[in-house]
């Protein structure tokens, strides 16, 4: 026991080194004796986008259920539940007072987007149009459909939509409703950067133009930065307790999060800071070649989509990043490399052992995680494997679960582990960030980098999270063209050249945060945006 709790520590299993001040006060809610406790609540504000940044399992959904009036908080008392009047009393004089009074009076309506959009088809039979028309309370549906580019799938069955299409339909459905409070649990999985920026702008507009309260959980830090006005950081021990801090400015909240230390709370949340390099890594030009692939072409059906890949080389021991919009042929290229797909022209018979993690992870066997992973590698359970794979990917706690019972984020971590555990010449990871929370992305990035360095492995990563790509990749391969019609892939190039080409296509520039060198998206048409575009420097400080 750490001596602070009155009776006995409710978190026996957990080592609390530095107990936060909040844990000495009563929680907002505790699910039961020795069960998860939540301390603090986010404060939605009319006309503002409030962000929450933190890991999964820390109580964000619990907080939202309280703010939606679905869960009556018990202030940690189980015998004699306090009721809303007493809760209101506890929040008198805080930012939440008025909001909680409205919840008590049943005056808060909410529209929410769930985290795992992949599950929507299980609960809805019908096509996109039928789903969306039921939500059109503001008369804004046509414009949402246009800006989110949903038009082409309006008459398609919900069952047949891709992850990125489902995500955009779910965002449109949530924003089309007319409620006081909108809650979006992650907007970016499966979306490309252009789509992420559009979704962020739509949410901002609803706050600014309609004076709505928006609350957003987001793990893509570049997008969160663009999206939110204020930020609550959530920290604690997933599954045991969670603390939601008072609101911070978005810039400070993200900076403190990255530094690993929360200033006002006087709280360390991670041993080491996450740091970005201001300058592009120097390209190593003399590395050995792992493989040289020729010009390749591939088209589907009657040429509805066609891809042209310029021949190039993948170097030994590098992490090669692959970027480009959705529907441009990145997965098709991956399948050409793995031999799952035959090119129309060019011989891609590369004679490589490839370990491949596809974009949509469908490991649904009735098998436990430990049995599954030990069937892939005889390194399973060795101290090396535990340190390099199991720990950073937080697998220990889910080893005994069945694959079919895993959440999206858990399944992703198992799939990354399975991909890296196989012995191969080339490790190919398609969107490893999807469904990982912000801390898991950091850990997964480190695990992949370390693995590449220590095992002399070559890794090819397709992802849309620009911070992850920055921290992970040595070189970049850029796809461009017209999504769903034709795609073109250039040769792998240096990070600086690659980022410039990629971001020029998107017309997005980044500046550097003065304190941390973290890249931040410039406002379109701001002075810096125009200056950087004219200099052709979209990402790395000139
Ligand atoms: P997040 O949204 O941050 O992922 P949640 O609020 O969903 O977190 O859950 C926080 C913790 O509370 C989890 O450990 C979860 O298992 C637990 N929890 C959620 N709902 C209940 C419940 N009804 N009874 C007991 N524990 C719960
Ligand atoms: P990305 O990975 O960049 O999102 P993909 O390679 O998955 O792009 O797809 C490129 C285009 O090819 C998309 O329009 C997609 O719908 C289409 N496509 C992919 N696979 C097939 C297939 N087996 N048959 C027909 N069209 C396909």
Image (cartoon, helix red, strand yellow):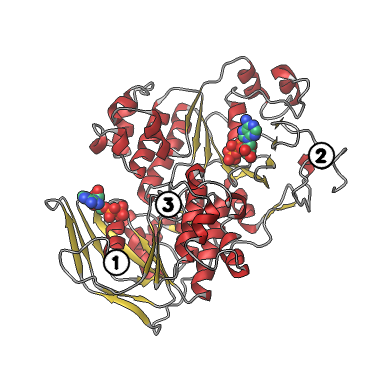
The residue drawn where x is 48% and y is 30% is 112
- In terms of depth relative to the viewer, which is nearer, 26 or 407? 407
**Tag count:** 3
Between marks 2 and 3 in the image, the one whose residue lies nearer the viewer = 2
Quadrant assignment, res 215: top right
The residue drawn where x is 39% and y is 73% is 425
| The residue carrying mark 1 has its beta carbon less than 8 Å from ligand 2 | no
Tag 2 residue: 24
The residue drawn where x is 77% and y is 50% is 16
- In terms of depth relative to the viewer, which is nearer, 209 or 372? 372
| The residue carrying mark 2 has its beta carbon less than 8 Å from ligand 1 | no
Tag 1 residue: 337
Q: Left or right of 190: which side holds 218?
A: right
Q: Earlier in the sequence, mark 1 or mark 2?
A: 2
Tag 3 residue: 526
Tell me, yes or no, if residue 44 can be seen here.
no
Q: Classify 141 as above or below 21.
A: above
Residue 348: mark in rendering: none
Q: In this view, which residue lies farthest toward the top? A: 105
Tell me, yes or no, if residue 379 can be seen here.
yes
Question: Around disc 2, counting alpha carbons within 10 Å, would you say few (fewer than 14), some (14 to 19), or many (20 or more)?
Answer: few
Question: Around disc 1, counting alpha carbons within 10 Å, would you say few (fewer than 14), some (14 to 19), or many (20 or more)?
Answer: many
Question: Around disc 3, counting alpha carbons within 10 Å, would you say few (fewer than 14), some (14 to 19), or many (20 or more)?
Answer: few
Across and down, in percent, residue 288 comes to: 38, 83
Q: Classify 80 as above or below 225.
A: above
Between marks 1 and 2 in the image, the one whose residue lies nearer the viewer = 1
The residue drawn where x is 47% and y is 52% is 412
**Badges 1 and 2: C-beta atoms under 8 Å apart?**
no
Q: Left or right of 308: which side holds 84?
A: right
- In terms of depth relative to the viewer, which is nearer, 83 or 417? 417
Between marks 3 and 1 in the image, the one whose residue lies nearer the viewer = 1
């Amino acid at each position: 026991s750490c001596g602070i709790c009155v009776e006995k520590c409710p978190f026996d299993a957990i080592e609390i080194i530095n107990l936060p001040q909040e844990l000495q006060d009563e929680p907002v809610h505790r699910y039961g004796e020795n069960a998860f406790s939540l301390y603090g609540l986010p404060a939605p504000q009319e006309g503002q986008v409030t962000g929450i940044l933190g890991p999964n399992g820390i109580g964000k959904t619990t907080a939202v259920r309280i703010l939606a009036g679905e869960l009556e908080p018990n202030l940690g008392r189980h015998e004699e539940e306090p009721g809303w009047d007493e809760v209101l009393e506890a929040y008198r004089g805080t930012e939440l007072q008025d909001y909680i009074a409205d919840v008590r009076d049943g005056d808060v309506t909410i529209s929410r987007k769930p985290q795992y959009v992949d599950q929507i088809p299980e609960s809805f039979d019908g096509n996109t149009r039928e789903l969306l028309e039921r939500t059109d309370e503001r008369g804004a549906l046509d414009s949402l459909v246009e800006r989110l580019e949903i038009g082409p799938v309006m008459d398609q069955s919900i069952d047949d939509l891709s992850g990125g299409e489902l995500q955009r339909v779910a965002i449109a459905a949530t924003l089309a409703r007319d409620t006081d409070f909108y809650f979006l649990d992650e907007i970016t999985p499966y979306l490309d950067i252009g789509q992420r920026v559009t979704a962020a702008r739509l949410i901002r507009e609803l706050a600014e133009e309609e004076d709505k309260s928006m609350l957003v959980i987001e793990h893509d830090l570049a997008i969160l930065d663009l999206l939110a006005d204020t930020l609550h950081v959530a920290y604690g021990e997933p599954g045991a307790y969670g603390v939601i801090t008072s609101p911070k400015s978005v810039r400070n909240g993200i900076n403190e999060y990255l530094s690993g230390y929360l200033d006002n709370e006087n709280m360390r949340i991670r041993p080491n800071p996450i740091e970005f390099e201001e300058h592009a890594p120097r390209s190593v030009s003399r590395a050995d070649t792992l493989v040289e692939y020729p010009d390749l072409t591939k088209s589907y059906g009657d040429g509805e989509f066609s891809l042209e890949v310029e021949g190039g080389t993948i170097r030994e021991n590098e992490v090669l990043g692959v970027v480009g919009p959705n529907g441009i042929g990145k997965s098709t290229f991956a399948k050409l490399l793995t031999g799952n797909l035959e090119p129309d022209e060019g011989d891609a018979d590369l004679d490589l052992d490839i370990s491949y993690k596809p974009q949509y992870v469908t490991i649904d066997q009735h098998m436990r995680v430990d049995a599954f992973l030990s069937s892939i590698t005889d390194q399973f359970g060795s101290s090396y494997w535990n340190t390099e794979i199991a720990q950073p990917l937080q697998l220990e706690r889910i080893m005994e679960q069945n694959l079919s019972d895993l959440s999206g984020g858990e399944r992703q971590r198992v799939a990354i582990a399975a991909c890296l555990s196989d012995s191969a010449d080339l490790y190919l990871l398609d969107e490893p960030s999807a469904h990982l929370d912000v801390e898991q992305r950091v850990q997964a990035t480190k695990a992949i980098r370390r693995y590449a360095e220590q095992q002399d492995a070559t890794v090819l990563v397709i992802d849309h999270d620009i911070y992850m790509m920055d921290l992970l990749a040595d070189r970049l391969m850029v796809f461009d063209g017209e999504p769903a019609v034709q795609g073109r892939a250039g040769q792998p190039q240096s990070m600086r050249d690659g980022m410039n080409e990629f971001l020029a296509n998107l017309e997005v520039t980044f500046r550097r945060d003065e304190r941390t060198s973290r890249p931040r998206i410039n406002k379109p048409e701001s002075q810096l945006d125009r200056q950087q575009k004219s200099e052709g420097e979209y990402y790395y400080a000139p």
